[in-house]
């Protein structure tokens, strides 16, 4: 029976997320209140033993409840939120990009993502600060993806995208 319980605890440890959900915090709070009502002198240590969480986390949840009367879920430390789109996917924008690309093809001029970005910026469809490198690169990526999808551009963008953050 000891091997089964150890395997079960290891499974739970590996399967659960590192960030605490609101339900996890409510479970900690309920156990803390239960052990306190039973007269336990160190309820946080009992909760740690029962749930396998850090003492500081359990005490933090209890302090949050005592201070605010509620507990909240922690947001995960990752870039998982939806970002606003730079270039709105609309029929009018698609027609603008297609007309621009077709006019460039008629004159046999090479069209790049930077050209599309500049055109959309001039037409007030896409607002980009061309003096800022990061804003320009983000705008180039947005215009390139939209133009490639809608106008069937097969050329690569003519800008170098540098990685931010040293990865």
Image (cartoon, helix red, strand yellow):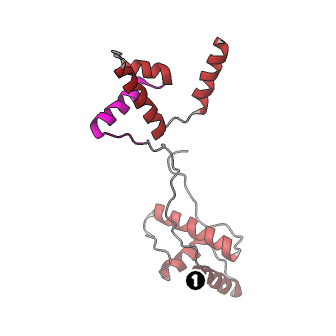
Q: Main secondary structure of the magenta part?
A: helix
Is the residue marked by circle 1 packed among few (<14), some (14-19), or many (20+) residues within 10 Å? few
75 and 1: which is toward the camera: 1
Tell me which corner region of the image, top left, top right, bottom left or bottom right, holds residue 141: bottom right
Q: Position of residue 66 (x, y in %)?
A: 29, 34
Viewport quadrant of the C terminus:
top right
> Does 53 appear in magenta?
yes
Is residue 50 among what the camera can see? yes
Q: Position of residue 64 (x, y in %)?
A: 33, 36
Is residue 20 among what the camera can see? no
32 and 17: which is toward the camera: 32
Which residue bears the numbered disc 1? 92
Viewport quadrant of the N terminus:
top right
In the displayed structure, 126 sits above or below 162; it is below
Left or right of 113 in this view: 132: left
Highlighted magenta segment, given as a residue range? 52-72
Tell me which corner region of the image, top left, top right, bottom left or bottom right, holds residue 47: top left
Tell me which corner region of the image, top left, top right, bottom left or bottom right, holds residue 131: bottom left
Which residue: 63% across, 26% down?
11
In the displayed structure, 4 sits above or below 104; it is above
């Amino acid at each position: 029976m000891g091997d089964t319980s150890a395997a079960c605890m290891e499974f739970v440890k590996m399967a659960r997320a590192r960030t605490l959900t609101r339900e996890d915090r409510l479970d900690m709070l309920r156990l803390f209140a239960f052990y306190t009502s039973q007269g336990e002198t160190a309820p946080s240590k009992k909760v740690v033993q029962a749930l396998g969480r850090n003492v500081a986390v359990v005490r933090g949840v209890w302090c949050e409840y005592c201070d605010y009367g509620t507990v909240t879920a922690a947001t995960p430390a990752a870039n998982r939120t939806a970002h606003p789109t730079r270039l709105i996917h609309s029929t009018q924008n698609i027609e603008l990009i297609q007309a621009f690309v077709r006019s460039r093809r008629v004159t046999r001029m090479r069209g790049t993502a930077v050209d599309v970005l500049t055109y959309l910026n001039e037409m007030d469809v896409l607002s980009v600060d061309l003096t800022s490198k990061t804003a320009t690169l983000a705008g180039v990526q947005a215009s390139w993806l939209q133009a490639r999808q809608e106008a069937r551009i097969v050329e690569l963008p003519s800008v170098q995208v540098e990685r931010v953050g040293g990865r």
